[in-house]
Image: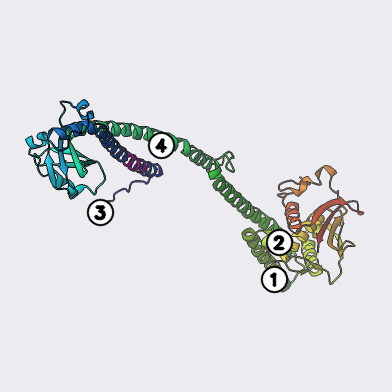
Amino acid sequence: MRFQLKPKRRLLTRMYLTSLSIITLVGFGLAWMVNILHAQNSYNEETAQLIAEIPQVAAELREHDLIPDTSAWLEENRKTQRYVMASCDDRFKQVWTSSMAVDRGLFDTCERFAEIKGESPPYYLTLSDNRGYYIYMLSVDIAKVHYNLLVMKDAEKLEQEYSKFSRRTYFRLALVLVLALVLLVSAAYWGMRPLVRMQEELKSIADGRAKSLSGGYPVELEGVTQALNQLLQQSAAQQERYQNAMNDLAHSLKTRLAAVHAILDDKALAQQEAGEKVMEQVSQMDHLVKYQLKRAMLGRKGLKQEQTSLLPLVTQLSQMLFKIYRDKDVQFSSRIPPMLLFPGDKGDIMELCGNLMENAFRLCISVVRVSAEINSRGEFELRVEDDGPGVADSLKQKILERGVRADTQSPGQGIGLAVCHEIVSSYNGTLTIEESVLEGALFRIRIPL
């Protein structure tokens, strides 16, 4: 089986062919019209000249006794020039033929002319002598009788002049087409430069050397470049969201896996009780996986808004953290109204409380306190504080960024507080780091209702 490569379609080739076809069509049309106008102009000039020579024509007619000798002006125009003429009556019946026309045997000129007189001039006929003639008609009244005088001129000389004029016209047209082709190539090269530049910039983006298209494109391409930049931004944001979601998932699962290890290592628990607690942690991990996948697909603003009871969640998290940090003998207390609801997704509040409480248990000396309420400004307010070393003023803003850690001595990726900051920001809330009355750190979250 043979496979033939299909030639690539080129936009420039189409543009060249279409443009040149249009220019050629218009050019040849104009050249054809110019030639016709030239022929008509030549015919009109000959007609005007014949009208000016009517006295000479009349003199020749007088010689044949067709008109009376009534004026001396005929004598002044007597010349040796002779015309190939024929005279027709109103019905174009030939009534007189000049001597030169007789010599050529042109006795049916009027009848032949009658067949083409309805056409537009110039009038061209091949007569009985098999020669081509241009025919000029003059309507005159001689001795009170109306005649149609047909003056015939050999077409050979006029045709040679017309042919010479046509060659010059088409030669000039060829020059115009060559110039048009040069201008088309130049215009195409100049016009395609922005597309070549766009191709190079897109290649740079694909290679990772740039993130977006630069400005300065022509007005016709601004919409395209803006749409491409928007698409690139959305793609980059989605990729970053996927990466952050996977990092957040790993960070969240790490605490649950630590709790599972602690449960399995606790010899005081019966096998059934340990199994139940492990399944509880597995259920939480399953919820976290679904939550992070959903956030990766929709983003935080795409998550369904709901209300979540806060106290049971905090109690459950504290019991898990007690297992993980059982060697520290942490004194934990919570001040949360039983009916208080978090104005958002359960996965969000689980991330917030889980990260903040895990940091507090890990960094405290012995005391951790969690409190929540609807404050005087009508906002949901959550506070997590401990009696640990606190956070230096120079780090209070930096540690809300991904990868920045205040405690470099213990293991971690530095993304827990960044996750909390992102969640709070998605609810148009604020996360601030203050000094606690316990002389440690106080993390305060305010979310408008």
Image spot of residue 386 (x, y percent): 86, 55
Q: Callout 3: 10 Å neighbours few (<14), some, many (20+)?
A: few
Horizontal relation, residue 313 to residue 438: left or right: left
In the image as oriented, which residue stretches furthest toward the front?
70
Badge 1 or badge 2: first in the primary sequence? 2
Horizontal relation, residue 399 to residue 125: left or right: right
Residue that badge 2 annotates: 256
Q: SS of the residue at dot 1?
A: helix
Image spot of residue 152 (x, y percent): 17, 37
Q: Nearer the viewer, mark 3 or mark 2?
A: 3
Q: SS of the residue at dot 2?
A: helix
Which range is magenta? 22-31
Q: Residue at x 77, y 47 (%)?
A: 399
Q: Which SS does the magenta portion mostly show?
A: helix
- Asked whether residue 265 is in view, the answer is yes
Q: Callout 4: 10 Å neighbours few (<14), some, many (20+)?
A: some
The numbered mark at residue 275 is: 1
Badge 2 or badge 4: first in the primary sequence? 4
Image spot of residue 281 (x, y percent): 70, 66
Up/down of 334 relative to 226, above or below? below
